[in-house]
Amino acid sequence: MKKSVNIGLLGFGTVASSFYHIFSEQKNEIDDLFSMPVNVKKIYTRGKSHPVPENIKKLLVKSAGDIIDDKDIDIVIELIGGIEPAKDIILQAITGGKNIITANKALLAEHGEEIFKKASEKKVHIGFEAAVGGGIPILRSIKNGLAGDVIKSVYSIINGTSNFILSKMTNEGGKFEDVLKKAQEKGYAEADPSLDINGTDSAHKLAILGRLAFSTSLTMDDIIIEGIENISQLDISFAKELGYVIKLLGILKNEDSKIEIRVHPTLIPSSSIIAKVDGVFNAFLVNTKFAGPLSLTGYGAGGNPTAGAVMGDLVETVSGIINGEGRRDFIMSKIKNKLNIKTKKDIISRYYLRFSAMDRPGVLSKISGILGENSISISSMIQKGRKVEGSVPIVITTHEANEAELLRSIEKCDKLDVITAKTMVLRIEDKID
Amino acid sequence: MKKSVNIGLLGFGTVASSFYHIFSEQKNEIDDLFSMPVNVKKIYTRGKSHPVPENIKKLLVKSAGDIIDDKDIDIVIELIGGIEPAKDIILQAITGGKNIITANKALLAEHGEEIFKKASEKKVHIGFEAAVGGGIPILRSIKNGLAGDVIKSVYSIINGTSNFILSKMTNEGGKFEDVLKKAQEKGYAEADPSLDINGTDSAHKLAILGRLAFSTSLTMDDIIIEGIENISQLDISFAKELGYVIKLLGILKNEDSKIEIRVHPTLIPSSSIIAKVDGVFNAFLVNTKFAGPLSLTGYGAGGNPTAGAVMGDLVETVSGIINGEGRRDFIMSKIKNKLNIKTKKDIISRYYLRFSAMDRPGVLSKISGILGENSISISSMIQKGRKVEGSVPIVITTHEANEAELLRSIEKCDKLDVITAKTMVLRIEDKID
């Protein structure tokens, strides 16, 4: 019978140092819970980390191998991030029969299936709640709670940086560049914020979520990804006038076994629950066939919330180890077939179109003529005298249209001599509650 | 090795018939997930139930004993409700080594500890996600996800009927009695709505939640319970004027290992997330030490949402059975010691007081004099000319005060000859986000 459970910790950055702090505070509780000591036995860090407190410097080892090869280590907690060497370390640890806990969304998004398959073969547990939605138990909710239900759609705000910028722009005005700068000063955006604002980070999380929600194989190439770089104050105020706010949404939909998986700035009704989720908060709105709509909101990032999710995984993993290893995770091993995933040209949506046009008679009839020829039906139109850099904005919202047809007609419009800049195209989601 | 998993279903009311419907729809998926058939083998109903479809009449048995004594039945799903015979059946089933899934909040609130203890001894799994919050995976979130964290407080809207009535009164006006009648006509309130509106139903759910959240022993007597029967349109509109809405809240707090567990109508800031949760929706706002605030919202009752939670428990239970029975549920077995629970006289809160007074000079100075003598400090005051049944309402909100002292001073005020009716006392919770 086991006498203790031992952890090897990889990394000592923001999340890992928060984890170590929480773990130390909770250690007595945890030891008591399991009636045996649960220890962090070794820590490996590559140096670009938070300072390691004096009293645990003795735990530092020189290489990840010192952890992987240690037969006494039951659980590897990987918090170094990035693809390599994390991937190699995790695969080796699994081969050695160790259980894994990771917050590495990029790795799981890009190589998750290989890792899950290996974990399933080796019958080890892999906990990754911390990879999506920080302190929000979204994966657990989807994986266990909704396992007997059918997930129809998930609408999510899963990038705190983008949400901070968009809600700041919405509530206080200001240009994208200026607000981004403020976010960087406050530590809400990184020095290089590109993965956050171009949608890649959201797409990583959505890939992980999508696999679980629909039990489908997925790659990053399956995801339609657009960022918030081109959202202007003009679009935010037109959206407001139309009763919408603009959020960077991660969207999953399953209709008749055809899946949509996309990340893009989206107009959603100002009255919807997640329209009010501002700042660095994350939110998930899960629509299921039977349990109905479920919304979860909380801190989606940061040291403590993410480390809190790691702690949850730790308790679950230790339970599993003491109760006898080698258990099968049915939900995880269900991911095998690739469902039919819609490409951009298959999408049906309502659209917000902002044309930049010369202030001349006949412009509107030219635009509406082209839209009409391509079966794009207009729902509402705003044209005002306000000039923006010599042009007049014309905003049109459409009824549901096929994206291929829409883009084709926008391409034609943009070739008109009265159109002065590339037309802004945003998707509208009306029924998200 | 097991070749199939068999269920005995007790009851065929709203939740049970929804469960059977969902189960039938999902059966192929589930059989496929576990690579073996999962069957409803027997159904016992006492007659006061939904009609049992013709094709499953062959599953009906004459007594609960036919299920309990059936060695082939692995899981008993108890959806008959009430204390007896449900309690006796569940205890017998556990003794026979069967796993239990139940939505019976009254039973678990009143006899949960006896049932959990027996389940722990017999090493069977007991799933009760459906007992609290319908389709919202709140127990799972607390039990697994937050196991390594510390729960500081939970604010919850856990009774759909009361929330429907209060939000209707807030948004559309109308008297309590009239709105209740409408709710009954629409099927949102039962013919005898007393357990819903007097706070008992909320207290049942809060008892279950409190045990898990704080790993403490609890009885119904530990809970402070007040209902919404006396909430008038007057209080709702004064609250609005002060920037609050009135909600029937279930509150759990843990400060310095002193616990508060109470259900009562509460003034909460109109701007808070759960202030906007209207109608039959339920909501949970969980504050933890590390992961931060987490909010969950969804359908808290109804056939499909509750049956959806039963399905989640079923998938978890079947996983456990196939992976090898006799596992220990550490979190559940952690519930043993009784923490220090605050009684009414220990509560510190802000208060909303509505005095009914004669329209005479000097009334306010008498009231404020008594409050002052008892160290109750006034935060705001509203006195208006509007007469209600011959009296004038005077509304006072207090700074934080001890409830024993507050009630003592209200008792004195109510003896004043200028006070014409019992003073309305409601608690205010400002910091719930």
Image (cartoon, coloured by chain):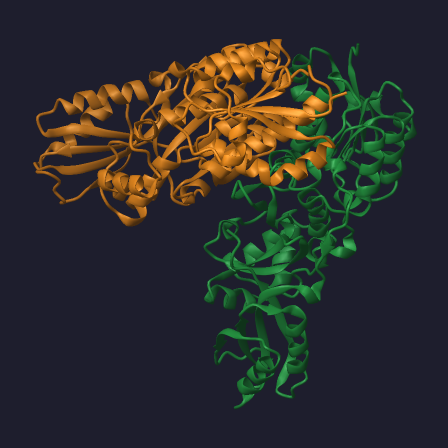
Chain colours: A green, B orange
Q: Is residue B134 visible?
A: no
Q: Is residue A353 visible?
A: yes
- Closer to the camera in the image, B176 or B2: B2
x and y, in percent, of residue A189 in the image = 67, 50
x and y, in percent, of residue B351 in the image = 31, 30
x and y, in percent, of residue B312 in the image = 60, 32
Looking at the rendering, which quadrant does residue A10 occupy? top right
Specify whether B366 is left or right of A254.
left
Looking at the rendering, which quadrant does residue B261 occupy? top left
Image quarter where the N terminus of chain A lies is: top right
A338, above or below A332, in the image: below
A287, above or below B107, in the image: below
Q: Residue at x 40, y 27 (%)?
A: B202
Specify whether A115 is left or right of A373.
right
Specify whether B426 is left or right of A160.
left
Looking at the rendering, which quadrant does residue B224 occupy? top left
Total numbered circles: 0
Q: Residue at x 66, y 39 (%)?
A: B28
Residue at far bottom of view: A361
- Closer to the camera in the image, B390 or A186: B390
A9, above or below B118, in the image: below
Q: Residue at x 36, y 24 (%)?
A: B200
x and y, in percent, of residue A347 in the image = 65, 64
Specify whether A130 is left or right of A398.
right
